[in-house]
Every structure is written in C-alpha cells, then in structure tokens.
Amino acid sequence: MRDTTTVGDELTDTQTTGAPTTSAPVTEGKGKKKDREASLWSDAMRDLRRNPIFLIGTVLVLAMLVVSAVPQWFTQGSPFDAGACTLQNSLKTPSGDHWFGFDIQGCDVYTRTIWAARNSVIVGVVTTTLVTVVGGGLGLLAGWLGGIVDSVLSRFAEIFFALPLLLGGMLIMSALPGNAWTVSIVLATLGWPQIFRIMRSSVLQNKNNDYVMAARALGAGAWRITIRHILPNAIAPVIVVGAISLGVYISAEAALSYLGIGVQPPEISWGLMVSDASVRWLQAPHVLLFPAGALSITVLAFIMVGDAVRDALDPKLR
C-alpha cells in the first residue's frame, strides 16, 4: 500500500516499509531461459529451420560445394591425367565400374562430371559475390546520399541494365580468353544493376524510419547510421535475390560454354560436356543425361534456398 501526502498542489507517494524500492521483471523460476527479443532475422531463422525445402536445398548446396572444392575425394583419378581418355571406350554405356559410362572421346563421364562442378560453382559464387558487393555498395550509396550522386549512379546503372545478360556476355566473351574467372567478371559486369536497384529502393524505404531519426537525434554519425541501422534492415531483399541469381549465373555460364565462348578446353564445365554430348545424344543419351542432370540439380538447389529465404524474410507472407 502507498501513503499519499499533500504538499501544496502536488501529491507525493510514499512507499510503505518493506515494499520493493525498484520494479524488476518477475522471474518464473530457476532454469528457465529468458525470452529472446523478437526480430526479423530471428523469426526468419526459426522458420528456415522448420522448412523442409530450405533444408533439402541447403544439403544439396553444401554437397555441391564440397564436391567442387575437393573433387579428388569422389573420384579415383583426374580427367587431366595422361591416358584418362581412350577411344576404345568411346560411348560405352554405364556399368558397375564406370557408373556414368564414357563420352565420345572415351573419357569417363562420372569423373568429368565431378571435376566440372568446380568451374560451374566458381562462376556462380564469384559472380554473385561481385554483384552483391558492387551493386549493393553503390545502391546503398545512392539511396543514402540521394541528390546528384543518386542521379548519376542510377543513369550509369541503366546503361548496363539495358544490356541482356546472355547477349552481352556473348559479345564480350567473344573477344576475351575463356575461363571461369573471365566469365565471372563479365557476368558480374552485366548483372550488378539488378542488385543496385533493389538495394537503392530498400535504402530509400528505410532511411526515413523512426529508428533512423532517433539515431540522428542521439548524435550518431552518418557512417554509424548507415552500417548499424540502414544496412542490416535493407540487406534482406539483396540476400534473397543473390541466392536465386547464383543458380541463374551457373546456367548462364553453361549457356556460354555450350556456345563455345565460355570455359574453353582443356578446362571442363557442365556446359562444355552438354555441348560435346549434343552431337551423339540420341545414340548415347547417358553422355548428355548426367552432366545436364548435375547442372539442373545444382541450379534447382540454389533456387530452393533462395525461395525459402524469401518466404522467411518477407513479413507479408507470415
């Protein structure tokens, strides 16, 4: 109970003896965990752990990353070894010793499919990283600064955005040496405007929110506000698009290699294997089936992960 004392026109509450002097949250007992603060990222992680599509896609992605990093763990030899291909084995069908059979040159299709994952995954990961860093950084700069900086960067991005990915890649790669790193740089050069526009739009939506105004009122500098408040809240759509685009870039590399202007022999990629198999695939369908299947599964896995992340990070879908 409280005693009330009148002093002039004011009322003063005096706590009774033995009453607690400070208010504290009520504990429910020992051993019970405190409630975690709800946030977009914590809710998203909880949803992703319960999403079977995300779990399956993640397992496939991790498996493909391991295969591309250490292909020698999964094969007895290398397609680059001397005598790895023998014309006497040309177009032989799968067997117990050679699970995927042989291609036109008498090379083991299983060994080539495993080793081809490296170049295909390198293109996808490197291109997505470059696109996210360049496009995301410029989009953050344009959205936060606005004005003339925003106008110049937006017009510059529109120039590249007008170039179709595959058509522009074909045009540029026709004059450059074909390898995984060159393909990655070319695709990133043509693909960054998409991430730029998404990041810019997300920053414009977040920069005038109440928490930004509060940080300014407390004296936080522009750099601290950008890194601690704007970026964490604006990066979610970029992560979603990047995860989905990774599979798209792997497909783009396969298309360029299929046309003969991507990864060049003696290097191996799934696109090159599909191109070589297209000549005799009716006679020996296994030559086309396995590299095309590996390509499709990899692209599907990244798209599954991207779709699951999008559903988890989109509050409208909750």
Image: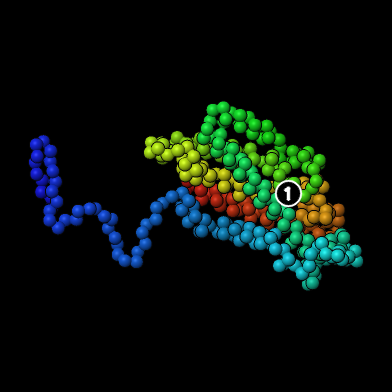
Q: In this view, does 241 lie to the left or right of 43?
A: right
Instruction: Find residue 94 and report its horizontal and vertical position in percent.
Output: 80, 67
Q: What element carries label 1?
A: helix
Name the residue beneath numbered marker 1: 181
Residue 219 visible in rendering:
yes
Quadrant in the picture for residue 115: bottom right
Q: What residue type is labelled 1?
A: Trp
Q: What residue is shown at x 14% (from left), y 58% (from top)?
A: 18
Asked if residue 164 is positioned above or below residue 64 in the image, the reply reads: above
- Neighbor class of circle 1 (other Cα within 10 Å; few <14, some 14-19, many 20+) is some
Q: What residue is shown at x 58% (from left), y 50% (from top)?
A: 307
Residue 230 visible in rendering:
no
Instruction: Find residue 206 and report its horizontal and vertical position in percent.
Output: 47, 38
Q: What residue is shown at x 90% (from left), y 64% (from top)?
A: 87
- The front one of 245 and 316 is 245
Quadrant in the picture for residue 188: top right
- The front one of 287 and 125 is 125
Asked if residue 71 is positioned above or below residue 137 in the image, the reply reads: below
Q: What residue is shown at x 61% (from left), y 40% (from top)?
A: 135
- The front one of 19 and 205 is 19
